[in-house]
Amino acid sequence: MKVIFILLMSTCCGYAQVFTDKIIKELKFEKKSPANTLILANVNGSIKAEGYDGDKILIEAERTIKAKTDTRLEQGKKELQLKQIDRLDTLIVYVSNGCNHFSYERKKHQNGWGYSWDCDESDCNPPYDYVFNFIVKVPAYIHLEVGTINQGSVVVSGMKGMVKATNVNGAIKLTALEGYASANTINGDVDIDYLRNPNQDGKYYSLNGDINAWFVKGLSATISFKSFNGSLYTNVDKLQELPAVLEKKQSENGIKLKISHNRFKVGNGGVLQDFETFNGDVIVKEK
């Protein structure tokens, strides 16, 4: 593993103190296997990841810290670190700000790695602002899980393996996909573009944004669509409506039935492509 720090700028402009540097990491799995996965977790800032033919993970992170005093700036430089966890077949890289914790959690609906915060402690409101912007090159064959929360988008291209992308206040764009894909954001659009039509299920969600999905001509899949205020648009000719999915819930008056998802058969049917929005439209096109 190689870690290089490059100082770019440290300026003082009146009241504001600004510090920017670059952190460069070169990582490699101890053992190459079909399960190899990179998890990259950001808090504030963007992630741009690209698959390539090499076997190393190349990470370039630009760190910017803003504070109103030199003391607060130095506190930010000390607390804001890029940390990693080596799980042999899985490498995890995450932003630590001295308050958050990143660990594996068992939850009711889904287990996985994620952040938690000590919200009752004073250091959860640090006296500085910060942004990490990532540019990453990863072996195209591995699985990739990337996510951020604020002040940036998530862009991934050229991956053959599984891709899972999350955001909260920003867009997600996944292009030249060949395997399983999952995208989930709250305030932003989701753009999906397949290099080859998927042979595995996919799941795409945006609360307050549109979902745009491009597939290769001749798609065979089952499309599931759910939205409160949005509509489904498509240029696919062979579209057959299937029975809707019903949700069953026990109530005081008996079993309550509710239509959950509308489903459509495209071509000969096949893998499930699940689209859900609340205030956005879903556009599914063959290119």
Image (cartoon, rainbow, N blue to C red):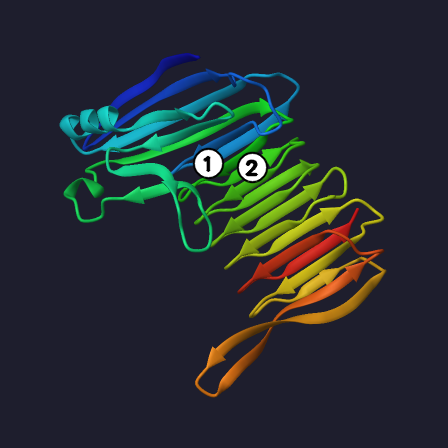
How many numbered circles does the render carry?
Answer: 2
Question: What residue sits 31% from the left and 44% below the top?
Answer: 116
Question: What residue sits 39% from the left and 26% below the top?
Answer: 85
In this rendering, would 165 be left or right of 8?
A: right
**Residue 164 - label:** none
x and y percent of residue 147 in the render? 47, 40
Quarter of the figure with the N terminus: top left
The mark that comes first in sequence, 2 or 1, is 1
Q: Are marks 2 and 1 in contact (CB under 8 Å)?
A: yes
Mark 2 sits on what residue? Answer: 155
- Count neighbours of disc 2 (C-alpha within 10 A) and say few if under 14, some if 14 to 19, many if 20 or more: many
x and y percent of residue 124 in the render? 22, 42
Q: Amino acid at mark 2?
A: Val
Mark 1 sits on what residue? Answer: 46
Q: Which image quarter: residue 142?
A: top right
Q: Amino acid at mark 1?
A: Ser
